């Protein structure tokens, strides 16, 4: 019998877990901006399990957003009391959890969001606004002359950006004598808390030096490392949840069973006891973060363009190809792991093997297209830092030059649609050769002008032209 996600939902199916707590007894302590698939599979999932333990019931989530897509998500979730079916999938596991940790979703309106953020009970504001939503240039500096930030600096009490909204809410809390909330970025970018603070302070300084100084002194922006492979939801996933579990969900999420969350234990107004459900709290998240970005995320980036050029649609299918599997294993072992600082108790080679095993999971149907989008944002975060480190140490960059050359070839041939803010520029530059590609300053910065990088890139592009994608990869791994 088909069950819709109504407040009275119960299930006798052993493969379906429903909230074991009274959702009406929850109270909001967190506003989350950007209620996408990853947030619901990750942070909301952790909190749901915490609530099931009878803990933290004053830390429920209120969803929020500022984009048209947020309105679509709000509409989808409103008819099911803000709940989401999160399905963990692997060859051995098919388990659905009806996550009930979100109890409201604000109207898509900056004023409504500011009013909620100014409420004393809200002690954490978390964000998943995507890696490209932080107004940074290729050097990691805030583009304060961006039209949206300029508009918020001219009209600070009527902001339109997330960062303007945060500042105005903090301004109101300061004026009312209310302690500031913590700003917790859950986006997948290096030093996400430091980056968020940098953007907030840059904009606040344009508005009012006094509020910028107060934010700098009083607001916590902990860095965090997040991890759970979460594909997009399509009609296929909606139909699967309906047929397999008998649940009618307008916006289910499918993901892998693996989750990791490492957070710096620095909060302005307290936090939920998430260590009770497996979250790791540390003094400094940097080494964990670098490990994940330069091994897991960089491996996704290394795989996707080669796989697309070789005609693969899904990640697990691509890794059945011995050439791609060896490429994904050899590149980080040779060029990334030797450049990483050690973490006590962590074996980088074992972590890499675990990542590759996760990528092989056929049940989540992760697509090459998802990994290939936004290369102009992802390559500078996941790939180029290792290239720069190797350059500084006088080491070879041949493997990563081949990775960049594969991206160049992808932009030249576009075997799948090129989804990128710089799509037109990437395609045009690719037509004009490797040097023109490296000349895109917003992506490569000064690194693209270094002679060793340009020479290695020319050689890699030439090799792909001579041997083809498979032949060039085989030449490297052998």
Image (cartoon, helix red, strand yellow):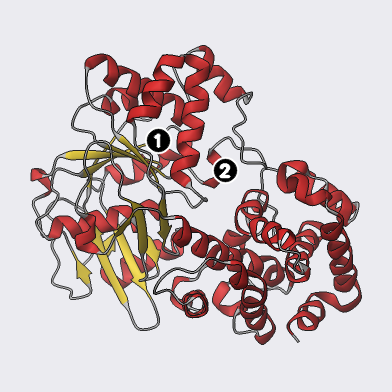
* In this view, 443 is above or below 158: below
Label 1: state its secondary structure. loop
Q: Is residue 379 visible?
A: yes
Indicate the position of residue 33 as horizontal and vertical percent values: 38, 39
Q: Of the numbered discs in the image, which one, if any, rests on residue 132?
A: 2
> Does 154 sit left or right of 417 as displayed?
left
Q: Is residue 250 visible?
A: no
Choose mark 1 or mark 2, whichever is in front. Answer: 2
* In this view, 129 is above or below 320: above
Indicate the position of residue 322 as horizontal and vertical percent values: 66, 87
> Does 339 sit left or right of 225 as displayed?
right
Label 2: state its secondary structure. helix
Q: Residue at x 67, y 59 (%)?
A: 389
For the N terminus, the image quarter is bottom left
Residue 387, quarter of the rendered image? bottom right
Residue 213, quarter of the rendered image? top left
Indicate the position of residue 241 as horizontal and vertical percent values: 33, 66
Residue 400, quarter of the rendered image? bottom right
**Dot 1, how many residues are within 10 Å of its Cα: few (below 14), some (14-19), or many (20+)?**
many
Q: Do labels 1 and 2 touch, CB within 8 Å?
A: no
Q: Of the numbered discs in the image, which one, if any, rests on residue 65?
A: 1
* In this view, 442 is above or below 166: below
Q: Residue at x 30, y 32 (%)?
A: 106
Q: Residue furthest front?
A: 393
The numbered mark, 1 or 2, whose residue comes first in the sequence reads 1
For the C terminus, the image quarter is bottom right
């Amino acid at each position: 019998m088909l069950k819709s996600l109504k407040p009275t939902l119960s299930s006798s199916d052993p493969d379906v877990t429903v909230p074991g707590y009274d959702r009406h007894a929850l109270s909001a302590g967190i506003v989350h901006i950007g209620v996408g698939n990853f947030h619901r599979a990750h942070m909301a999932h952790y909190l749901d399990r915490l609530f099931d333990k009878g803990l933290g019931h004053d830390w429920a989530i209120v969803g929020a957003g500022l984009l048209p897509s947020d309105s679509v998500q709000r509409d989808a979730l409103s008819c099911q009391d803000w709940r989401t079916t999160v399905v963990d999938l692997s060859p051995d596991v098919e388990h659905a959890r009806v996550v009930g940790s979100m109890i409201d979703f604000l109207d898509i309106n900056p004023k409504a969001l500011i009013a909620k953020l100014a409420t004393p009970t809200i002690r954490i504001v978390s964000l998943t606004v995507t890696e490209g939503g932080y107004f940074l240039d290729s050097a990691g500096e805030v583009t304060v002359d961006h039209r949206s930030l300029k508009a918020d600096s001219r009209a600070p009490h009527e902001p339109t950006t997330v960062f303007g909204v945060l500042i105005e809410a903090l301004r109101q809390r300061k004026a009312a004598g209310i302690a500031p909330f913590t700003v917790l970025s859950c986006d997948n970018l290096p030093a996400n808390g430091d980056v968020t603070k940098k953007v907030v302070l840059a904009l606040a300084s344009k508005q009012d030096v006094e509020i910028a100084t107060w934010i700098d002194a009083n607001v916590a922006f902990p860095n965090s490392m997040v991890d759970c492979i979460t594909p997009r939801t399509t009609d296929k996933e909606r139909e699967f949840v309906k047929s397999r579990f008998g649940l009618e969900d307008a916006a289910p999420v499918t993901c892998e069973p693996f989750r990791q969350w490492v957070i710096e234990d620095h909060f302005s107004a307290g936090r939920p006891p998430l260590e009770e459900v497996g979250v790791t709290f540390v003094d400094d998240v940097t080494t964990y973060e670098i490990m994940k970005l330069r091994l897991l995320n960089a491996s996704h980036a290394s795989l996707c363009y080669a796989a697309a050029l070789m005609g693969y649609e899904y990640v697990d299918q691509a890794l059945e190809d011995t050439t791609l599997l060896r490429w994904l294993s050899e590149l980080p072992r040779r060029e990334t792991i030797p450049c990483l600082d050690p973490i006590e108790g962590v074996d980088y080679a074992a972590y890499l093997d675990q990542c590759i095993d996760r990528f092989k999971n056929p049940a989540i149907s992760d697509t090459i297209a998802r990994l290939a989008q936004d290369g102009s944002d992802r390559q500078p975060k996941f790939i180029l830092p290792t290239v720069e480190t190797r350059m500084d140490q006088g080491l070879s960059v041949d493997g990563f030059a081949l990775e960049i050359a594969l991206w160049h070839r992808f932009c030249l041939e576009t075997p799948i649609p090129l989804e990128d803010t710089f799509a037109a520029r990437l395609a045009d530059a690719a037509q004009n050769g490797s040097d023109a590609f490296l000349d895109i300053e917003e992506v490569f910065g000064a690194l693209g002008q270094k002679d060793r990088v340009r020479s290695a890139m020319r050689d890699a592009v030439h090799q792909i032209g001579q041997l083809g994608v498979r032949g060039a990869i085989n030449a490297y791994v052998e």
